[in-house]
Structures are given as structure tokens and as C-alpha cells.
Amino acid sequence: MDVVYVATEHTSHLACARLALEGGKHVLVEKPIGLDAAQAAEIAGLAARKGLYCAEALWTFFLPKWDVVRQVLDSGVLGEIRTVLADMGEHFDAGHRILRPESAGGPLLDLGTYPVSLATWVLGAPAEVQAFGQPHPAGVNGQVSAILHDPHGNQAVVHTTLFSDTPTTATLAGTRATLSLPGPFHQPGDLVLTPSGGGAPLTYTEPRTAHDALHFEAAETARCIEAGLRETPLRPLADSVVTLRAMDAVRDRCGITFPQVPR
């Protein structure tokens, strides 16, 4: 056995990651890597002490489409990014795991990881977070809207809900151009670059393979381990901690608690 893939419910991610790392095995942990930033930091620290590979299996960051997004960001073609807009909503029927309080249910850790991780990746750790939530009759949070702004005042507006299906789109708006990610933005699909002032848009297209594209994160894990790397540059563990710290702030603003996480 070379590597352990932790794909349990969220509440077991920390315990299973500990078992794998203490047993001397590289580990790929499903998103969210922990219930909060403290758990994520604990896993990252243990992996570093053991000299083992560890990554959060947030599959979006390993897609070819996301490599194109990186190239667009690195090129500076967007100018200074002033606004990030990202949404992810899905309707769930009674009985689903996401509706169970004992499973750290609610949309934030499941669906919300995608828009919040995009916001923190593009704008960095937020200087301030404002958020509002709405409860679900099942006893979990039902939906959250949040504004995250960086030290320069640039803003991300993120939304996630389990009440309804929403467009699940994202936008990175800069001073020189705008990059649009049609829904579902976190899956393989199109990117549209539109210059400011109404220039002709450029479109990147890849097959909409949906969850069949999970193999990209497995391939990256194999590549990194073979190369002797202890984490992936596509989703460093520090980025995972920053995302969860932002979600901790969202939970704090909305009064969302998980039984497994002390306040």
C-alpha cells in the first residue's frame, strides 16, 4: 500500500488521516480536509513531521480547465481582480447525509468549499468576513451568503444553499478583463474571457466529463509521490487551511456550530 484515500464523512477525516500518517502512509483526504482550520493545520503538521505526502482532494484544482485559469491569472490579462462572484446550490431530499447535524451537515463544508476556495485562492486570506445564514428545518444551516474582502478592499461574494438548484457559476472580474466560468463552474467545461469595454470574447472549451474527471487528482498524487514531493503545488495545504479559516469566520458570523468542534 502506497497511499490512503480518505473518503469518509467529514467527521472522520481527521481521525482517518491520523491513522494513515501515523502508519507511515501518504494520504489524500477528501474535501474539506478537516471540519475547521485547526484540524487542517493538525493534519498538515503531522504530514510534515512524518515526511509524507498529504493533500486535500478538492478535485476542481486538478482539472485541465483550472490550469488554464492559472495561466490567465499569471498572465495578468485580467488586470487587478476587484470582484469574485461564486455560487453553488443544490436541492437535497430528506434523509441525505447533508441534512444530518451529527455529520456536520449543511451546505458550507460540502458545496460551500468550492466558492470559498475559489475566493481565497484568487484574493488570498480575507481581511474581513461578513455573512448571513438561514436555518433548515432538519436542524442544520440551509444557506449562507458571505462577503470576503482582502486588505485592499477587493471583494468576493459567495453563496451556497441546499434548498434549491442555483446556476453554480463563477466570475473573476478585473480592471482589464473578466473571466466567466459557466455552471457548474467547479467541473470540466468552458471558460470565457471578455476584455473590458466590450471586446470580442475568447472561449476555452473542454469536454464536460463531470465526476469522471476525479482521476486527475489521483494522477497528480501519483506524480508528486514519484517525484518525492510532500504536497502538490496545485493545492498546497496552506491554501486548504486558509479556506477553512475563512469558513470558520463564516460559521462564527452565522452562529453555525458542529457538535464535533469546540467553540
Image (cartoon, grey):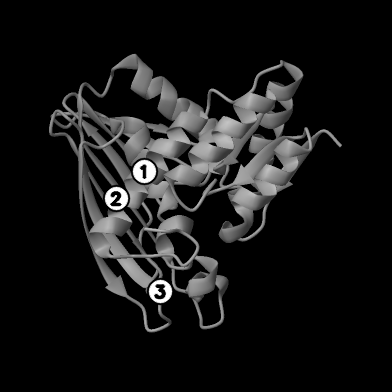
Q: Residues within 10 Å of mark 3 (few under 14, many from 20)?
A: many
Tell me the number on the disc at residue 249. 2
Q: Residue at x 48, y 68 (%)?
A: 105
Disc 3 + disc 2, Cβ < 8 Å: no
Whether 123 is drawn above or below 107: the answer is: above
Residue receiving disc 3: 140
| 205 left or right, relative to 199 | right
| Residue type of the residue flagged with mark 2 | Ala
| Residue type of the residue flagged with mark 1 | Arg
Query: Between residues 9 and 166, which one lies in front from this camera angle?
Result: 9
Whether 139 is drawn above or below 103: the answer is: below
In the rendered image, which quarter is residue 214 located in? top right
In the rendered image, which quarter is residue 57 located in? top right
Q: Quadrant of the N terminus?
A: top right
Visible in this render: residue 44? yes
Residue receiving disc 1: 245
Q: Residue 32 location in percent, x, y?
A: 52, 49
Q: Residue 256 location in percent, x, y?
A: 34, 65
User: Counting residues from the N terminus, which is met first, the one under dot 1 or under dot 3?
Assistant: 3
Disc 1 + disc 2, Cβ < 8 Å: yes
Callout 3: SS: loop
User: Counting residues from the N terminus, which is met first, the one under dot 3 or under dot 2?
Assistant: 3
Q: Residues within 10 Å of mark 2 (few under 14, many from 20)?
A: many
Mark 1 → mark 2, Cα distance in angstroms: 6 Å
Callout 1: SS: helix
Mark 3 → mark 2, Cα distance in angstroms: 17 Å
Visible in this render: residue 182? no
